[in-house]
Image: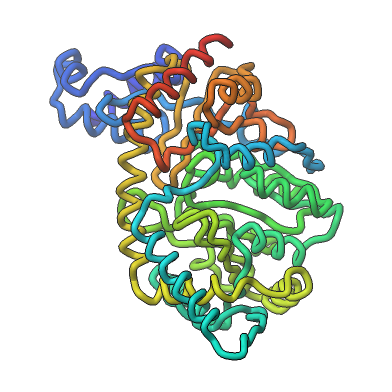
Amino acid sequence: MKIYEQTAELLRNQILEQQLRPGDPLPSIRELSSRLSIGRNSVIHAYMMLEDEQLIEPRPRSGYYVRARPLSPNPGTALEPRKVQLGATALEIIGAAQNAQLVPLGSADPDARCSGREFFYRRLSRHARDIAAAPGGNSHYVAPPGLNALRAQLARRLHSASLPAGADDIVITNGAQEAITLALLALARPGDTIAVESPCFYGTLQCIEALGMRALEIPGHPQLGMDMEALAQALSRWQVKAILTNPSFNNPTGACMPTAARHRLLRLACEHDLPVIEDDVFGELCHQGSRPPPLKALDTEGRVLLCSSLSKTLDSDIRIGWIMPGRYYEQVNYLKYVTTLASPGILQHAAADFLADNRYERHLRQVRRRYQARLGLLLEAIYQYWPGCALPLIPKGGFLCWVELPPGFDSDRLYRAAQQAGIGITPGSLFASDGRFSHCIRLNYSTFEATPYYLQAIEALGDLIREQL
């Protein structure tokens, strides 16, 4: 056994035997090198091994720490299918996002202060002026599947994500939420069961709730997403109509499903002849390198329904989404027509012009760098002001950070107290049908800066957390 493997085994045993607990710092590379009388490269390789095993994680400018405990209290075991009953808290949080008096760490809105957004609205204004000046006031719907020019631009972008697509493969929707709703309507009926990862975005759970369906919650790994072994067991036990997953920078955890797991998921879907609904709204927001390939790019049978939008990458107010429904195209296109008839034509024209100009790619490069930097600022503030038992997961994309607190912690109580203090957060209880993530919270760092406005809010949250411990 090589020296770095011996070092990794030593630390691995200390972690598994809980001599080192979640959140504990590991010795610096220099310190461990000196203590064990080994080279620094051996320590570096040992830490890389443990990071690959998801036992430790690096923190910006702070070294390595023992990774957070698993998300599920019973990892590898799915719950029974159940009705979803989230109540009104989710709508309350969305409404609170409009309250300018709250520090905006709650609702999942992107940074609105970017040049790409400004350029989009200039294009929108130009189209509005053209419509107002048109003789005769001609008006008509842009009927499903939507504006051809926009669908062609979206197909071009999907090609860059290793997904061959044509304009005729895409249906335009009013955001990704409608795309997911149309997919569910096309695939299942009231009383049917949908397999989802857990934790799961509360908007998805509410769609399932509103349609009278049941959610079968599959445990998720903090960094790797849906547990494939648990999914395989669940599909063998329960009658499921569809699998719904957010594999690229999951909301709320930021997890990114590895390519091997994506292939495994598709094999399971094939074995059980199931469709897969893919929520890809954060897929473009990788912090480094290339975006992960959508599940749809690996789909050779047309069973994946890809759903996405401009709402997370550009602006929440731009309700332009799309669905690439594969073999379910006719059902989805018809359902779009009978439910909402059409999406606003003026928004579709503006989006088509915006995407054709290539400003979108420049915009994405800007916000990716910005979100990566702001994540580092948020983590530094959490490590400085919050108790050591607060364990933030470190996403590799998106702009959401999931923070685990000790079992028994009440994030709903923290949410209410934070609101009283003028701070918006999202309680973890919303991300499961039974509230089992009530010891977690989700933070939005899209606009976070190291200014008194934000740092005082993080410090105040730290004080409120300590009051419960």
Splitting the image into 4 quarters, where does residue 278 fall?
Answer: bottom right
Front-most of residues 359 and 372: 359
Q: Is residue 443 above or below residue 197?
A: above
Splitting the image into 4 quarters, where does residue 416 fall?
Answer: top right
Q: Is residue 203 above or below residue 344?
A: above
Q: State the residue at coordinates (66%, 76%).
A: 327
Splitting the image into 4 quarters, where does residue 126 fall?
Answer: bottom left
Image coords of residue 260 (percent x, y): 47, 54
Q: Is residue 397 shown left or right of residue 336? A: left
Image coords of residue 452 (percent x, y): 35, 25
Q: State the residue at coordinates (25%, 28%).
A: 61
Image coords of residue 125 (percent x, y): 46, 70
Q: Is residue 187 shown left or right of residue 67? A: right
Residue 50 in view, yes or no: no
Q: Is residue 262 above or below residue 139?
A: above
Quadrant of the image containing the C terminus: top right
Front-most of residues 76 and 384: 384
Q: Is residue 35 shown left or right of residue 166? A: left
Residue 279 in view, yes or no: yes
